[in-house]
Image: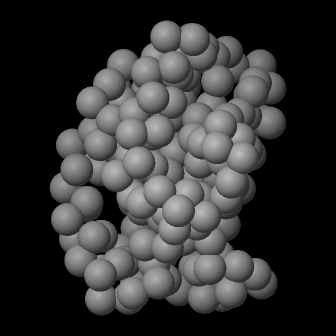
Amino acid sequence: MKRLMNNIVFIGFMGAGKSTLAKMLAKEIKTIVVDTDKIIENMEGKKIKKIFESSGEEYFRELEKKVALWLEKSVQNTVISTGGGFIHAENLNKIGKVIYLKSTYDGIIKRLKTHPQTKKKFAKRPLLHDAKKAKELFKKRESLYEEKADFVIDIEKFNNEKEIIKEIMKIF
Ligand code: S3P
């Protein structure tokens, strides 16, 4: 069994598959997985969509920063999936080794549109509701993801999630 000496942090745009792959990787290396969006939902007792509606995006970003500080201080040997904007947390690289799940914008949209629960996938993500704005956000974020990444995995090169996990396992 491979052992994690540090946290693994998945970053990437909405819909890149961070949560799914984080769960699969944690299972593979027999460790714990946490999801920053889920932590925030638990803190607030509300879904992300509701937090955006009732308190706004800035408030949500503050919560992300709080979670980032907690992860750095208190979490080890864990696989962490993050929200697409978590890269704005200044201490991101202090939390663990950062893996960027890279895809083109069209690849992301295709992935979401062919998902059996496509409606739900879009509905829960307020920043995907306006396609023009979402694409602009993607363009703005692309270079940031690259900058923050210790490892880049081009997810469009692979046929399925199992293949991606195999590739990630080569990192250890
Ligand atoms: C966001 C991504 C979402 C969630 C929130 C904002 C973003 O997470 O944190 O809706 O700013 O990119 P996913 O990347 O899991 O969709």
Residue 112 coordinates in the image, percent (x, y)? 59, 80
Q: How is the image coloured?
A: one colour
Q: Is residue 60 left or right of residue 104?
A: right
User: With respect to residue 161, does 127 lie above or below?
Assistant: below
Residue positioned 20% across, 65% down in the render: 140
Quadrant for the C terminus in the image: top right
User: With respect to residue 31, does 132 lie above or below?
Assistant: below
Residue positioned 30% across, 88% down in the render: 132
User: With respect to residue 83, does 92 lie above or below?
Assistant: above
Residue 92 coordinates in the image, percent (x, y)? 36, 30
Q: Return the residue found at the far front.
A: 54
Quarter where residue 137 is shown: bottom left
Residue positioned 45% across, 49% down in the render: 60
Residue positioned 43% across, 21% down in the render: 69
Residue 8 coordinates in the image, percent (x, y)? 53, 29
Residues 161 and 120: in front is 120
Residue 134 coordinates in the image, percent (x, y)? 35, 78
Quadrant for the N terminus in the image: top right
Q: Is residue 60 left or right of residue 41?
A: left
Q: Is residue 92 left or right of residue 119?
A: left
- Answer yes or no: is residue 42 visible: yes
